[in-house]
Amino acid sequence: MMKKGDVAPDFETTTESGNLFRLSDHKGKKVFLYFYPKDNTTGCKAEACSIRDSYDVFQGNDVPVFGVSGGTEKSHKSFKEKNNLPFPLLMDEEFEIAKLYDVYQKKKMYGKEYMGIVRTTFLIDEDGKVEGIFGGPEGIEKVKTKEHADQVIKFWGLKL
């Protein structure tokens, strides 16, 4: 599992709109990279809308936000449009990025085990190192879906 101080693994993918994305293109800026389990689910909607509602704070502090999940381009576009999300959703249909960040893990629901993304946020500093983690075993605290933007704003002390 990734830990605070680790270099955030670089990766290349596309956004829900088909635009090329490279994490390394954002070196020199803080980056808010969050992994969510599935498009159009209750908890993921609450988390995304929390971030959407505080997006001006992130923009005003020059902090780009990126959501990462499995799913198709169509499901990402639908999720983004339904919820008016102003930030890109990154494609990870084969869970390669989730595996790179060690957030694709065995999960259990209603007594059944399955593989999926564990809700986790990585706050990456200007040098490309993990400055903070929410969720997962190394997290500062659990991701509070309805208040997640506030958790990140508080952690980084961003100007409102």
Image (cartoon, grey):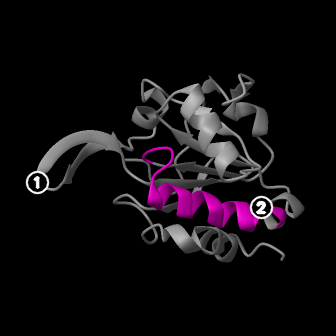
How far across and down, in percent of the image, does residue 98 sit?
44, 37
How far across and down, in percent of the image, does residue 82 sit?
65, 48
Disc 1 secondary structure class: loop
Q: Is residue 78 visible?
A: yes
In the rendered image of this protein, does residue 41 appear above or below residue 74? Answer: below
Q: Is residue 137 left or right of residue 142?
A: left
Q: Quadrant of residue 96?
A: top left
In the rendered image of this protein, does residue 150 appear above or below residue 137? Answer: below
- Give the residue at x 58% y 28%: 74
Q: In this view, does 111 lie to the left or right of 153?
A: left
Kindly give the residue lying farthest to the left in the view shown.
111
* Residue 111 numbered tag: 1
Q: Residue 38 magenta-drawn?
A: yes
How far across and down, in percent of the image, does residue 69 sit?
50, 39
Q: Give the range drawn in magenta.
A: 37-56
| Residue matched to label 2 | 55
- Give the residue at x 74% y 47%: 87
